Image (tube, grey):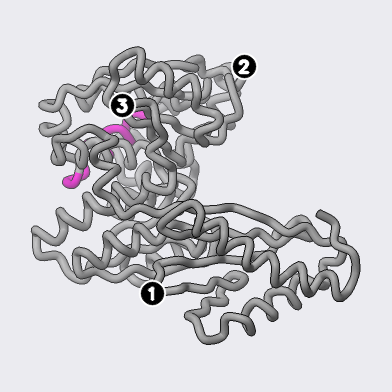
């Protein structure tokens, strides 16, 4: 049962599309599955951007929530090699998740409490296939998964800028935080947007030659390792940044651009209204910066706000994500767009809310 679980729930970094090039070039190509896991640990440790010595010297103590998945095998092994003291919770790799495996604050209450009670500097949460990553600050507060990519990108951008690397390019999807754009432009770089979805992000990254990219759901994609989301790579880079900053996680978070995202949706009884609503929103904000590669996104440059509307692929729903420097502004922007949609809906038929 355990072996079957491992074979069908391997970390995404070890799935064929990412693993095959490594196996073909490695001394492990004829070895068993567990050996391949440790080959990837070596590959992460050997990334020039992973500062192993700084991490070891920092003497970090962390709490890991492995959600009873394969992360309970591979993550402690990586952290041990980095000289990090790791306390693991939900570390039985049996596939019986101790809680909803989405690495969201509401699902990480136990992790937050243990970080505080253990006096750890950081809480680490991975999803079942170890491709998404979220952090908890030393005070038990969420670092916020949108900022996983931002923190890692800032580290790589600062490092590359000091080395005189140019151009400095990052990529994230349209629904991810503007904070990545801000830290990129701070170093004189350029940020590009892709449609939502890992494959769309990696396609754009290859097209523009990105240093780093990913998604606001905690997915870090670092081409120097491979073109796929990888929590192992993300942890190693984040710990390198933390060791260099020499400050608490909460203090570091306070140095990053502050934004808040509000998530709303409109449910429709008639899916034919979706295109009409998107068209109405485009018309309403035609004087703003519009992006239409995936639904409609409106950027309000002066106020540093945006709102993104995109259709669901499976339901008659429009998802509405909005971001602004404050929670109140983000929610107000979302509600403004919803009001436009509701006006159109009411002129056709009674909405299903």
Residue 292 appears at what percent x and percent y? 57, 77
Q: Vertically, is 195 above or below 67?
A: below
Label 2 Cα neighbours within 10 Å, binned few <14 / some 14-19 / many ≥20? few
Q: Earlier in the sequence, mark 2 or mark 1?
A: 2
Instruction: Say which residue label 2 marks.
Output: 1
Q: Which residues, given as a range, are shown in magenta?
A: 37-49
Q: Quarter-wise, where is residue 304 in the image?
A: bottom left
Q: Give the alpha-carbon distance from disc 2 to disc 1, as whole Å.
A: 56 Å
Q: Secondary structure at mark 3?
A: loop
Instruction: Say which residue label 1 marks.
Output: 302
Q: Main secondary structure of the magenta part?
A: helix
Residue 289 appears at what percent x and percent y? 48, 80
Q: Mark 3, mark 2: which one is toward the viewer?
A: 3
Q: Quarter-wise, where is residue 72 in the image?
A: top left
User: Is residue 56 or residue 62 the one in the foreground?
Assistant: 62
Q: Residue 337 in magenta? A: no
């Amino acid at each position: 049962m355990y072996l079957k679980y491992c074979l069908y729930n391997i970390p995404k970094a070890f799935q064929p599309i990412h693993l095959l090039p490594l196996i073909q070039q490695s001394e492990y190509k004829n070895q068993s599955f567990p050996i391949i896991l440790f080959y990837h640990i070596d590959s992460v440790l050997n990334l020039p951007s992973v500062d192993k010595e700084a991490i070891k010297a920092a003497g970090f103590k962390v709490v890991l929530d492995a959600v009873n998945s394969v992360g309970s095998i591979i993550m402690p092994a990586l952290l041990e090699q980095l000289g990090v003291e790791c306390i693991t919770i939900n570390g039985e790799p049996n596939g019986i998740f101790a809680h909803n495996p989405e690495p969201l604050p509401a699902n990480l209450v136990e992790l937050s409490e243990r970080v505080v009670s253990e006096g750890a500097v950081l809480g680490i949460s991975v999803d079942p296939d170890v491709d998404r990553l979220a952090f908890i600050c030393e005070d038990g507060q969420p670092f916020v998964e949108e900022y996983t990519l931002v923190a890692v990108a800032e580290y790589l951008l600062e490092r590359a800028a000091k080395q005189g690397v140019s151009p400095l390019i990052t990529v994230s999807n349209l629904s991810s935080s503007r904070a990545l754009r801000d830290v990129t432009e701070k170093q004189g770089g350029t940020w590009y947007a892709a449609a939502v979805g890992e494959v769309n992000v990696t396609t754009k990254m290859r097209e523009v030659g990105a240093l780093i990219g990913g998604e606001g759901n905690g997915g870090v994609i670092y081409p120097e390792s491979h073109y796929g989301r990888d929590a192992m790579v993300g942890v190693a880079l984040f710990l390198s940044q933390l060791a260099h900053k020499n400050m608490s996680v909460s203090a570091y978070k306070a140095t990053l651009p502050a934004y808040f995202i509000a998530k709303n949706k409109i449910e429709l009884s008639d899916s034919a209204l979706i295109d009409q609503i998107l068209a109405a929103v485009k018309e309403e904000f035609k004087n703003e910066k519009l992006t239409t590669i995936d639904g409609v996104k409106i950027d309000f440059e002066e106020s540093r706000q945006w709102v993104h509307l995109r259709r669901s692929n499976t339901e008659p729903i429009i998802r509405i994500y909005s971001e602004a420097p404050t929670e109140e502004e983000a929610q107000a922007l979302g509600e403004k767009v919803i009001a436009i949609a509701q006006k159109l809906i009411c002129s056709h038929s009674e909405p299903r809310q």
